[in-house]
Every structure is written in C-alpha cells, then in structure tokens.
Amino acid sequence: MTKRRMAYVLLVLSIGTGASLLWSIGFFDPHKVLLEVIATTGGDYGVVVGNWKLSTPAIDAVPGLSLSRHDVYVTGEPIPSDAYDLRNDYILAEGEVIGYDGHASERYPLMNVTHWARINGLDFFLRKWLAILGLVVAILLLWRRKEP
C-alpha cells in the first residue's frame, strides 16, 4: 500500500512541476512566446513554445503566403544588455504580432515586444524532464500495483 501512496505523491509532484513550468514560460498567456537565439538567415529568434500564438487573422488572410511560425522577427522594446548572451538560455517575449517580415520565398511573424524575461535553460530542461519522468514512473507504479 505504501508503494501505491508513493506513486500518487510522485504523480501529484510531477503534475505540479509540469504546471509550474508551463506557468513560468507563459504557456497560459496568449501574449507570451518562449524564444531561443538562432544563427540563421531566417528570423531573429527561434520559437520554442507558442507557435500557435503567432497566428492572427491579419496574417492568415494574406493569400499564397508561405508563413513559418518556427522563427519570428521582433521589434519594439530592445532586449536588455544583460540578456544578450543567451546561448544556453531562453527568452520569454511578451507582445503581439503586428504583421510579417522575411524573404520573398518565406515570411515570418513580426512581433512587437513590450517586455523581455530571461528563462534559465538548465532550469527549463530539468523541470521539463523531471515532470515527464515522474509522470511516467508514477503511471507505471500505479499500473503495476492496480487492484483487481
């Protein structure tokens, strides 16, 4: 019976860890997108979480437009100088999509950023995998210990 209780505790802890991670990266806020620094000829930043938030009626109304929501161009509030070297970290950008920009063959959403926040990459990685691993282990324990 104690293994079953431990499984329930692990399940609650992993769901709590996952929910806190989603809350901290702005998953539930329609105006926040988690970005990472990329070094390509495409957009300014790569979109880690929030691709669906970059869809707007104005962009979707343009016929024949090849729109990539995996990269994004930014404008508005400049990124703080202490967050400039972000090779291992992520950036939480708050703002709204105001149009599109890019090359002739492919366009990217243009986001007007009103606020930047830095997300530690190691913290993001650890909380994500702890939540996933805890959930899997809890489900396996509960499945193995199910009562007939």
Image (cartoon, rainbow, N blue to C red):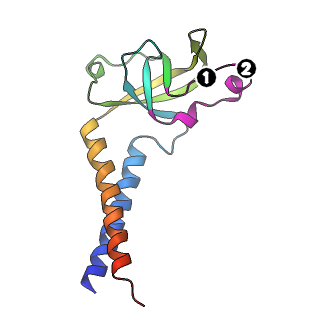
Residue farthest bottom in this picture: 148
Amino acid found under the numbered disc labelled 1? Leu
Residue 11's quadrant in the figure?
A: bottom left
Q: Residue at x 50, y 22 (%)?
A: 72
Disc 1 target residue: 67
Disc 2 and disc 1 in contact, CB within 8 angstroms: yes
Element assignment for label 2: loop
Question: Residue 98, image x and y in percent?
Answer: 61, 20
Q: Assign the C terminus to one quadrant of the image.
A: bottom left
* Residue 77 horizontal/vertical position (percent): 44, 17
Across and down, in percent, residue 139 comes to 37, 70
Label 2: few (<14), some (14–19) or many (≥20) C-alpha neighbours in 10 Å? few
The residue positioned 57% from the left and 30% from the top of the image is 54
Q: Is residue 12 left or right of residue 104?
A: left
Task: Look at the picture and state if 8 lies above or below 119.
Answer: below
Residue for badge 2: 62
Foreground residue, 91 or 134?
A: 134
Above or below 52: residue 106 = above
In front: 38, or 97? 38
Q: Is residue 59 magenta?
A: yes
Q: Which region of the structure is painted magenta?
A: 48-70
Label 2 is placed on what type of residue? Val
- Give me the C-alpha separation between circle 2 and circle 1: 10 Å
Query: What secondary structure is found at the residue carrying circle 1?
Result: loop
First of labels 2, 1 by sequence position: 2
Residue shown at 28% from the left, 87% from the top: 1
Taking 39 as reference, is 53 above or below it?
Answer: below
Image-quadrant location for residue 84: top left
